[in-house]
Amino acid sequence: MSRFSQRFPTAFVTGGSSGLGRVLVEGLLSEGVEVWAGSRSVERVKQTGLPVHPVALDLSDRQGVEDFLRAPTWSRCPALLINNAGFGQFGTIGSIEPDELSKQVIAMQESAMILSRHFLIQPGEPAPAVVNVSSLAVEFPIPYLHAYNSVKGGLSGFSRSLAMEFPGGKDRSFVVDLRPGDFRTGFNDAVDLDSKNSDLDPVWDALEHHLKNGAVPESIWPPVRRALLRERSRTVRVGTFFQAKLAPVLSRFFPETWVDKVHRSYYDLGKVGRG
């Protein structure tokens, strides 16, 4: 048994069938952790071929999440929760219906908050830890992903608030605010795209370019593993050197107007409406 699996013998990962969630599941399995992987479709989890316990869970169904947590299976929670599931809608604010905005808030923020609460208040050994996967969009919003930016910002704020209550320490509960930048996961393929508005094509093309040239998905596991073994609440930025290291530092030292100008250029916002 590894040092990691001694501290975290069991884990539950939402959105564990694809993208960064699958990479995190594979990292946990490599350490000998028993993993439950949640997804709206159990079949998607089974198709990965990974030796996990598939869990059917629709995070956009708040009542379903609460019913899920009342099931006898979760009378003793796993030692680690990773709230990873997420999706986006790309378009002008007028193109996104209120129900769709609400759906993203429930799925990516409210449900993550409910799951985090349930895990953190459970007694027992080892004390549970939580990783909430937010985004570097908290610091550098992605244009025209309005609800995505908002819920990730809210989730990050929730994590930092929890860190005051659960600072961590050896064998104590703690919370990690994990902020990934662009990774080559095909996230763009799953985004609900407003294809009717060609004015936004330059921004979408820039977004796809950054994703295709992003960090290798497997590179997310080592920093997550290190953060968990430190057993302290913290913010962890992961991605390319520019996004995860350089940009956050430079943004603190340069005027906001300069940062905004670079940010807009990065996503070709100056070309919107010129086509």
Image: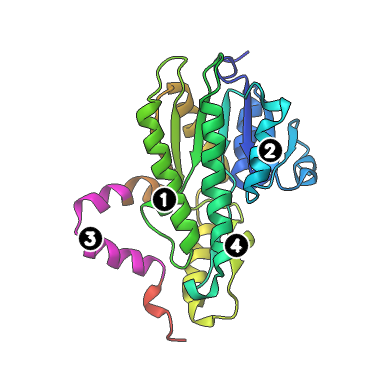
Comparing marks 3 and 1, which lies closer to the viewer?
1
- Whole-number angstrom distance, CA of label 4 to CA of label 3: 29 Å
Q: Is residue 249 magenta?
A: yes
Q: Is residue 254 above or below residue 267?
A: above
Residue drawn at x 31%, y 49% as measured from the top left: 248
Q: Which of marks 3 and 2 is nearer the N terminus?
A: 2
Q: Name the residue under label 1.
A: 153
Question: Which label's residue is closer to the chain start, 1 or 2?
Answer: 2
The image shows residue 63 at horizontal and vertical percentages of: 65, 45
What segment is highlighted magenta in the picture? 248-267
- SS at badge 4: loop
- Asked if the residues shown at circle 3 and circle 2 are in contact, with their CB atoms under 8 angstroms apart, the answer is no
In percent of width and height, residue 75 lies at 66, 23
Q: Which amino acid does label 1 sit on?
A: Gly
Residue 2, position as x, y percentages in the image: 59, 15
- In what element is the residue under mark 3? helix
For the point 20% across and 56% down, which residue is it?
254
N-term mark: 3 or 1? 1
Q: Name the residue under label 3.
A: 256
Sort mark 2 into few (<14), some (14-19) or many (20+) by Cα contacts within 10 Å.
few
Residue 98 in sight: yes
Q: Is residue 132 above or below residue 153?
A: above
Q: Are marks 1 and 2 in contact (CB under 8 Å)?
A: no
Q: What element carries label 1?
A: helix
Crowding at dot 4, Cα within 10 Å, few <14 / some 14-19 / many 20+, comes out as some
Give neighbour class at mark 3: few <14, some 14-19, many 20+ (Cα, 10 Å): few
User: Residue 118 location in percent, x, y?
Assistant: 56, 30
- Name the quadrant containing residue 87: bottom right
On the image, numbered disc 4 is attached to which residue? 191
Q: Mark 2 points at which residue?
A: 67
Q: Which of marks 4 and 3 is nearer the N terminus?
A: 4
Would you say residue 219 is visible in this rendering? no
